[in-house]
Image: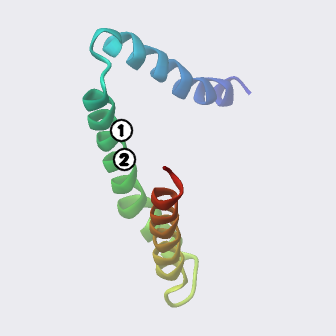
Amino acid sequence: MGASLLSGLAEPIGAGIGYLALFGVLSDTVFGTVFGLIAGVMMFLALDALLPAAKRYTQVHETVYGLVSGMGTLAISLVLFRFATP
């Protein structure tokens, strides 16, 4: 129970530390850079660790189909949001 609590608190504590570290320089450029770096790390983890592990438990190419359909859904939603905003 204690380990799961520490694991759950890691993200908010990290966010607080990051906010305090970047408090004086928070601008759109800094936000974009930080979010881009975080997205790159998440993509690396997903493609390097999670995707091969998922492929071991499925048949044929189900994992790749899920990945591509998810990416396509996100791309379409980004296009639709672009047209929805004034």
Examine the rendered structure and indicate whether residue 2 appears above or below residue 45: above
| Quarter of the image where one finds residue 44 | bottom left
Name which residue type carries label 2: Ala
Residue at point 46%, 79% (across, down): 64
Quadrant in which the N terminus appears: top right
Examine the rendered structure and indicate whether residue 34 appears above or below residue 82: above
| Quarter of the image where one finds residue 6 | top right
Residue at the extreme front of the image, as rendered: 86
Horizontal side, residue 21 vs residue 55: left or right:
left
Name which residue type carries label 1: Phe
Q: Secondary structure at mark 2?
A: helix
Mark 1 nearby-residue class (10 Å; few <14, some 14–19, many ≥20): few
Q: Which mark is residue 73?
A: none
Q: Nearer the viewer, residue 9 or 71?
A: 71
Q: Secondary structure at mark 1?
A: helix
Q: Which mark is residue 35?
A: 1
Q: Which mark is residue 39?
A: 2
Horizontal side, residue 34 vs residue 85: left or right:
left
Q: Nearer the viewer, residue 78 or 10?
A: 78
Residue at point 31%, 43% (across, down): 36
Q: How is the image coloured?
A: rainbow
Q: Position of residue 31 (x, y in %)?
A: 33, 30
Residue at point 27%, 15% (across, down): 25
Q: Position of residue 26 (x, y in %)?
A: 32, 19
Residue at point 31%, 33% (across, down): 34
Mark 2 nearby-residue class (10 Å; few <14, some 14–19, many ≥20): few
How far apart, in angstroms, are the residues tagged by discs 2 and 1? Answer: 6 Å
Horizontal side, residue 34 vs residue 16: left or right:
left
Examine the rendered structure and indicate whether residue 67 appears above or below residue 24: below
Asked if labels 1 and 2 touch by Cβ distance under 8 angstroms, the answer is: yes
